[in-house]
Image: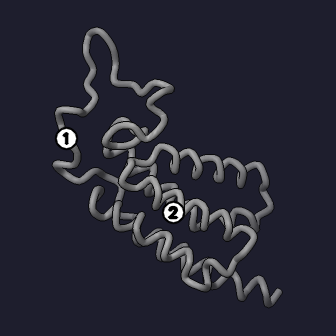
Amino acid sequence: METVKHLARPLYATALLAVAALTACSAPASGNGPSASSPTTTAAGSAAPTASDSAASGPYGGYASAAEACDAISTQATGASLLPLSAAQGKTAELEQKKAELAETAERAPEALKADFTQLKDVALAGLTDQSVYSNGQFEAAMAPVTSWLSANCH
């Protein structure tokens, strides 16, 4: 029981820091991205992304807008900090769903963030079996560039 308390404190602190850092990052920054390349709806078609758009290909990666990218990245970065808590609950199907969503976000992230978000994903997944990534600062180091990107591109 003492081990659980010892591990829960750093996880709780990390989760609180992640939530606090990412809470204000849910809307796009004004003037973000070139407006000429923004998807528009025309009579001939719609702006809905196709299957080939799921990879990071546009200014917002695999997302249709800055708002959508900011929301997904903020949500998944916060969720990454909570993965060990989900694992501790023993809900295997729910944990697998969260891991899949995190991996999808890493694939769809804008090019400027793709490597950093992939690193965050990898560290968060490693934290499921090695909780020391939270106590030795590895998770915080992986979260820092994602938080910086969110601060610069979303508000």
Q: 89 above or below 68?
A: below
Density class for disc 2 (Cα within 10 Å; few <14, some 14-19, many ≥20) is many
Q: Label for residue 75? A: none
The residue type indicated by label 2 comes to: Thr
Give 93 or 126, whichever is nearer the viewer: 126
| 1 on left or right of 21 | right
Q: Label for residue 34? A: 1
Residue under the point 18% across and 37% down: 35
Q: Which residue is mark 2?
A: 78
Residue under the point 31% across and 42% down: 59
Of mark 2 and mark 1, the one earlier in the sequence is 1
| 96 on left or right of 115 | right
Q: Position of residue 101 (x, y in %)?
A: 59, 47
Q: Position of residue 53 (x, y in %)?
A: 44, 31
Q: CA distance from mark 2 to mark 1?
A: 28 Å
Quadrant of the image for the N terminus?
bottom right
Residue under the point 59% across and 85% down: 136
Q: 44 above or below 17?
A: above
Give 146 or 28, whichever is nearer the viewer: 146
Residue under the point 28% across and 29% down: 39
- Disc 1 on helix, strand or loop? loop
Q: 66 above or below 45?
A: below
The residue type indicated by label 1 comes to: Pro
